[in-house]
Amino acid sequence: MSEEALDALVREIRACTVCAGELPLGPRPVLHVSTTARLLVAGQAPGTKVHASGQSFTDASGDRLREWLQMDHATFYDARRVAILPMGFCYPGRLPRGGDRPPRPECAPLWRDRVLAFMPDIRLTLLVGAYAQNHVLGPGNVTARVRDFRSFLPRYFPLPHPSWRTTGWERRSPWFGEDVLPALREAVRQALI
């Protein structure tokens, strides 16, 4: 599978309007992929800042995720090494009581497997948040999966969503910083060498 064919698929994705009528800001698919990536970040869907910038994780969640990974911007956004493929490519809107809506259900079934077929060198997939974990692993509890991360290695590494809402969860879960983050950083380092 060639980079040119993947580029053609990405152009097709960026022109997608399948759920345009359901998107409050309209379609703007955001993904970063290449045929040579070794690490895959599978998140949920872009927020408003990412929708505006067109670049994944250009918000506080991205800052926290990069801090967890101890990864600089240059490495994180080098699609030749790190692919970012969320469950939904467009901003899905807000829930009535706050927080973002779930990723649109049309997106992952329509595009995800087609894109992944072009990325045979992925060594590790970070499953960031419940939507990514449930899509790949089936229904389950995020905290339990994160605590039991070793059982998903070497292919997957489940993580909580790095939003501000995770701050309290991290305080109540000191094992995350003590056990999970060092193992995460080592698994990412090994995937990228």
Image: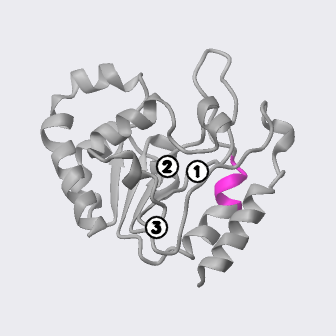
Label drawn at residue 87: 1
- Quick one: SS at disc 3? loop
Going 77% across and 64% down the picture, which residue do you hit? Answer: 12
Q: Answer yes or no: do the residues labelled 1 and 2 have beta carbons within 8 Å? A: yes
Total numbered circles: 3
Label 3 vs label 2, nearer the camera: 3
Which of pointers 1 and 3 lies earlier in the amino acid sequence?
3
Q: Nearer the viewer, residue 91 or 33?
A: 33
Q: Relative to 170, is 178 above or below?
A: below
Label 3 amino acid? Arg
**Quarter assignment of residue 20:** top right
For the C terminus, give its image quadrant: bottom left
Q: Nearer the viewer, residue 161 or 29?
A: 29
Label 2 amino acid? Ala
- Quick one: SS at disc 1? loop
Q: Which residue is mark 3?
A: 80
Q: Which residues are magenta?
A: 105-110
Which of pointers 3 and 2 lies earlier in the amino acid sequence?
3
Q: Which residue is mark 2?
A: 132
